[in-house]
Amino acid sequence: MSETQETTLEMPSEEMRRFGHDVVESIVRHFETLRDRPVVSWSNRDELEALLREPPPEDGMELGELLGEFEEKVVPHMSHVDHPRMFGFIPGAGTFVGAMGDALASGHNIYAGTWIESSAAHQVELVVVDWFRQWLGMPESAGGTLVSGGSVANLTGLVLAREVRLGDMREDGVIYTSELAHSSVDRGARILGFRPDQVRKIPTDEACRMDVDALWEALLEDAEARRWPFCVVANAGDTSTGSVDPLSDVADFCAAQGLWLHVDAAYGGFAVLDPRGRELLRGIERADSVALDPHKWLYTPFEAGCVLVRDFRRLYEVFHILPDYLVDVAGGPQNVNMCDHGIALSRSSRALKIWLAIKHFGLGRYRAVISRTMGLARYAQELLEATPGIEVVSPAVLSVVTFRYVPSWESDEEEIEQVNHEIRQRVWESGAAMITSSRVRGRYVLRLCVVNHNTRRADVEEVVRLIGELGPAVRER
Ligand SMILES: Cc1ncc(COP(=O)(O)O)c(C=O)c1O
């Protein structure tokens, strides 16, 4: 090619239309056929190396062929976390509307870092985050920003806590959190330079909620040792059991002691849209910061997290830095620059997909779906309780129930763990459903979490029936 010939990556409109149409077709097929696909599906590294390892081609490929490769080589080797019988971890099930929101955001190449580069996308983000604020019942001073997920939301909350309550980094600063806190709290503390012993794990009570008496005891110990507690991270739906810490009591404690209260509501936060959930989460409105994950119980395609802060200005105070090369886009109270309110400068519009989906389906439908999934988790608990050999370890408070099969034959803790591990494995191998495991007070448990908007009663019945059959059967392996 001659040097004077201009090379671009432009495409003819017709080709864009055709490819766009084919991509949408592929996505629609995904939704149409999801229920009939295996829930768990992966291949080992060697197979995938053989299938996908290659140098980038010097000359490009035809788009139809490429989409075919995606369908053949990528799709079959992925589990479906949006499958209606995906009950493992915290399932994420985006909607088609949300996916199209992502397509619009990236198709329009929205740069949601500065106001002048995407003022309306910024406004959409302010609106969406303000909806969340209202749902949680936080004051009007509160506001926030969308981030990649709960981990970054927790990290952001910890940054604020440290900056506001600790000032400079201190060797003696202490964070309190529940023994059931998500690992992202430890990771956030580690990123910030805290040692593991600066994150004190408070034991939980019978209901897996942070024991506030134990919190007081820890505080007294630390005061005596002249350490500097500055933050409590409370759970609004812990990942293992879905338990909610006594948020009002923890808020009283923090208010009395001048500690920052961060609530990790990444999983459970949107349960406030259900009357029972609202009651369980009472006190969340008093938090200094809250982590939410729309890509969990608000059915937003990955990625979408949110950090809400009681005093929105704190984010600006802590994160704002104005280098010479950004003076031209400097924001202010009227023209908020989202890049001044968090870690990332370049960011996509995550708000668009949330905004589109909520406006399309209407909040009423979200309320109904969230309530229904909570009801389905209670239904799963009832069915498990009625299944011979199954012991429910923690009830479905939000939408997680933990349980284990206790064999009728003589068995010790180690054998119970092996048997339940085997049940989990066989559920995966069946392709029919996915459940995962965890530990509650040191004991191995299986857990079932209902979040997916498409999960039906029959799906819950099927997975419990399968577990019930596998229990006595695993001995014969
Ligand atoms: C309670 C809780 N907090 C934080 C996280 C981390 O969120 P993300 O995976 O979106 O980073 C999770 C993820 O499951 C969670 O359940």
Image: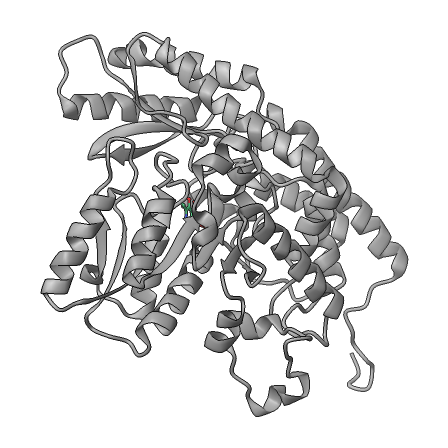
Q: Quadrant of the N terminus?
A: bottom right
268 left or right of 14 in image? left
Q: Residue at x 12, y 58 (%)?
A: 221
Q: Residue at x 29, y 35 (%)?
A: 208
Indicate whether 465 appears above or below 248: above
Image location (x, y in percent) of residue 62:
76, 54
Q: Is residue 82 visible?
A: yes
Image location (x, y in percent) of residue 53:
51, 54
Image location (x, y in percent) of residue 352:
70, 55
Q: Nearer the viewer, residue 473 or 167?
A: 167
Q: Is residue 186 visible?
A: no
Indicate whether 225 appears above or below 167: above
**Which residue of the protein is positioned furthest toward the bottom in this rendering?**
324
Q: Nearer the viewer, residue 247 or 46?
A: 247
**Which residue of the protein is positioned furthest toward the left in this rendering?**
224
**Which residue of the protein is positioned furthest toward the right in this rendering?**
14
Q: Quadrant of the C terminus?
A: top left
The quadrant where residue 55 appears: bottom right
